Image: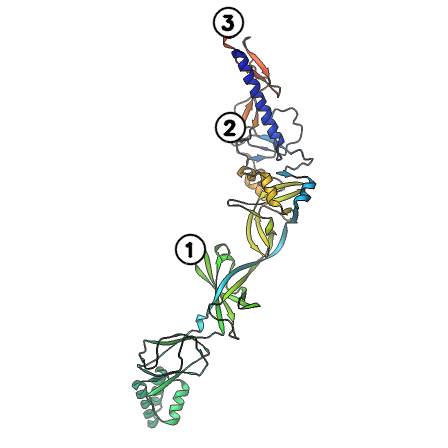
Amino acid sequence: MNRRDIIIVAAVAAALVVVGVGGFLAGRGGPQVAIASDPLAVRKPLYWVSSMDPTYRRDKPGKDSMGMDLVPVYPSGNGGGTPSDVQISSAVVNNIGVRTAVVQQGSLAHRIETVGYVGYDENTLATIDTRAEGWIEKLDVKAVGDTVKRGQRLYELFSPKLATAETEYLTALSSHVPDLIAAARERLRALGFSGGQIQELARTRHATDRVARYADSNGVVVSLGVREGAYVTPAMEVMKVADLSTVWVLAEIDEADAAQVSTGQKAVAEFDTFPGQPREGRVEYVYPDMNAATRTAKVRLRFDNADGKLQPNMYAHVAILASPDHEAVYIPSSALIRTGQSERVALALGDGRYDICPVVAGYESGGVVQILKGLVPGQKVVVSSQFLIDSEANLDAAALRLGADRSQCDQAARVQTGMNANPPATAPPPKSNGSTMIMPDGSVMKMPSQTSAPAKQKPDGTYMRMPDGSLMKMPTPAGQRDHAQ
């Protein structure tokens, strides 16, 4: 085999590669990109796309931002005028159990579910101390957690200072001077005497060096810092009592839900100790800081506890009922396909045709998810076997960008890609007598034109007819080139 034969064989192989690429493009289930100079392309194009930027779309022929001719995109051969990513026969649809749901629009309640634990209502915490130094003679509360009732004696204090104040009050009463009596009474109150104790002292006219302290409200002892016989001063905390008629439930919500929670919203909590007995409360406070480790915000809920059943540190399942969105677009949560980089749905077009459309999802509540962008009410999304359809589409980043611009996806996405916008003014590109073809990797391949032979051609040139009807000049063998010279 001489050199000329080798060159001819190589040219034929190249032509076969071109034919194979064209067959590959024709066999894809998505929209077909036709050769610009193909005389058989008589179908009406769906739109024109830039050969270098698949997101640059126009409704008519023209130039892209780089001055290159836009390439027409034709519908797939599925009998319809709308392109689709996947086409499945009705038998396969029944076999894989494809089910669809209609995209809805209306009022969507925002139910934020989380967990928390019961805590003391710190507004009811009361610190018990002494107003004078002395010794604890009797301590009626023995341990932390003991229950106390309003009016119950907590401890008895021996204090000479208190005995002196009592004697001064009795002396003022004997003087019958109103100002002196009032001053002595105010001193007793400052030292911690209750109104009842002052009245009792005025009635009995008997001073004692041992004074009792009584509980002002019901509650439980949270902390106990003394024992009987201990010496105490005004700076010491004897005990701390908390009222459990109301309790806090401290919960944490995700950072994404923090903006939806506000003071006064209704909350429902269920406790493992009392299954099937939900309790209603309110959001009392949303803490202003975010947990840097867990990326959650702390929320404080307030619940009534008149029966005293709720105890601190009980585990709670909490649902906060945030303000609903009355114009929300939403779909079943099972229809949303989430990946690490994107969110999308399988859109049912009818007749076994499906498209994969990128969406922007909002909050999820009650088995449905809000769609902020990407769908319009009335469309149908796949809620069963959507992952099979998604894998069949074999999407990549470019395909997702294409899907966002199709007419069946959200019209707002088309505006982003500038499909209806005027193309930027650019200088006219140089004239080209060749046509272009989009390769599978997105590159542009220039095909030789039928009139590619120059007007003035030397007689030693050899040409070969290509499958598209154009002529390709073959290099002259070395022997003939030497003979021509």
The label shown at residue 101 is none
Q: Quadrant of residue 295?
A: bottom left
Residues at marks 3 and 2, CA–CA distance in whole angstroms: 47 Å
Residue 12 image point, x, y percent: 57, 18
Residue 200 image point, x, y percent: 40, 90
Residues at marks 1 and 3, CA–CA distance in whole angstroms: 83 Å
484 left or right, relative to 230 = right
Q: Give the mark toward the camera: 2 or 1.
A: 1
Q: Residue at x 48, y 74 (%)?
A: 244
The amino acid type, in three-letter code, at marker 3 is His
Q: Which residue is mark 2?
A: 427
Nearer to me, 212 or 447: 212
SS for callout 1 = loop
Q: Give the mark toward the camera: 3 or 2.
A: 3
Q: Which residue is mark 3?
A: 483
The amino acid type, in three-letter code, at marker 2 is Ala
Which comes sooner in the sequence, label 3 or label 2? Answer: 2
